Amino acid sequence: MCEISRRESLKASLLAGAAPVFYSSRAWSALLEPIRIGLIGVGNRGNANLAEVSHEHVVALCDVDERYLKSAATQHQGAATFRDYREMLDADLDLDAVVVSTPDHTHAPASMAAMQRGLHCYCEKPLTHSVEEAKAMAQLGKGLVTQMGTQIHAGDNYRRIVELMRTKPIGKVTEVHVWCGKDWSGGRNSAPEQPAPDHLDWKLWLGDRADRPYRDGLHPGSWRRFWEFGGGTLADMGCHYMDLPFWALELGTPKLVTADAPEPAHPVGTPKDLHCAWTFDHQGHELVFHWYDGSRRPDCLSTLTYDNGQPVNWNSGVLFMGEDGMVLADYGRHYLLPEQQFVGFTPPPASIPSSIGHHREWLEAIRTGEPTTCHFAYSGNLTQTVLLGNQAYRAGGSLKL
């Protein structure tokens, strides 16, 4: 009898839903072994992701910043270290999966290179830097176990809201308002050019972007302020806050996107106080989905109060507006409004199981073939919609799809 390898065993588990899979004792043992993981980007979010997968076998670590790489290597002294993810992927490491935690502009190149080699992939949000990349990632992820790093998706509060909204307690939803008080503008006023720090491989950091001088502050964080590398507040936080309405309402592709900000689009820097609106055909009617960042807020928020008269003064949140009421939510709480109207309301029984953890869900799916909740088909569509807001703003304020 021919034995199947450990890698083949993991691949076979993905087909278990379609037909029974029988393993030899050696192959079954392979399924129980730690998953062999390589990490691309191990600073900041990468370090947090490393902590979440450290109970598996961390085989390889990669980062363009030598400081982050050395720090991670002290925690995993048996792991091979690399500055260039392409060298890591080409090395004979028998990897099963990768975790990508790099700046936005290198999400797709690194993730796609891994998936083209048959590796399962966990990638930070937003999934990609462009709409076209998001489509390609969703397609390439078919047959692999994928997960986008929107960790709040695993929270019980989001799950209870999804269950609630599917019972239609506020009737037909006609508007959704999402706002986030973060501000990733400022790229219009670039820092002066200077040599890149010795610990940073600047050319590898740039990836496929044209060579240019380093500017102070770009690494490790302010790259979000520049179109070439990030997408401002919307790209940073949109996948977190817009995830809830997308999931609860099962939204598809918008037919119209509009966007505005106090200043016209700048060729280099991302905007301050952006507002976007996506129009969807939803369950036989139009639904308009709004985004506001920085200091902007929905007009309706200024008149919204709790029954005790206190204003709703949240820095970030989600407001579903229906014909028969509203649902107000953020990461950890939610309310039906007006409160007096819903006195005695009984929420639906919990039907979406509690998550074992966003990272663990992905890891267990590699073993079992069960679907993840933020796979690249779902998160690719969400990311496309988010990025279309920026695209509309940069195109003059409107996109008809």
Image: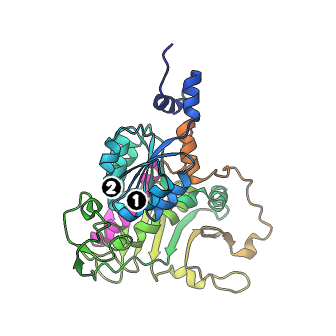
Rendered residue at 45%/80% (across/down):
294
- Horizontal arrangement in the rendering, residue 397 relative to residue 177 (left or right): left
* Residue on which the image places disc 1: 69
Q: Earlier in the sequence, mark 2 or mark 1?
A: 1
Q: In this view of the protein, which residue sits in the foreground, 146 or 296? A: 146
Q: Quadrant of residue 268?
A: bottom left
104 in magenta: no
Q: Visible in this render: residue 5?
A: yes
Measured as percent of width and height from the top left, residue 343 is found at 78, 71
**Is disc 1 placed on a helix, strand or loop?**
helix
Three-letter residue code for mark 2: Arg
Q: Nearer the viewer, residue 259 or 376?
A: 376
> Which residue corresponds to the image point at 73% horizontal and 56% vertical from the top-left?
348
Relative to 249, 121 lies left or right: left
Residue 347 x, y percent position in the rendering: 74, 60
Rate crowding at label 1 as few (under 14), some (14 to 19) or many (20 or more) other CA atoms within 10 Å: many
Task: Determine contact: label 2, label 1, CB under 8 Å.
Answer: yes
Q: Residue at (57%, 21%) from the top-left corner?
A: 24
What numbered label is drawn on residue 158? none
Q: Which mark is residue 83?
A: 2
Q: Main secondary structure of the magenta part?
A: helix
Task: Give how far across and how far down residue 15 sits, in percent.
Answer: 51, 30
User: Splitting the image into 4 quarters, where does residue 100 fall?
Assistant: bottom left
Q: Is residue 384 magenta?
A: yes
Percent position of residue 301, x then y: 56, 80
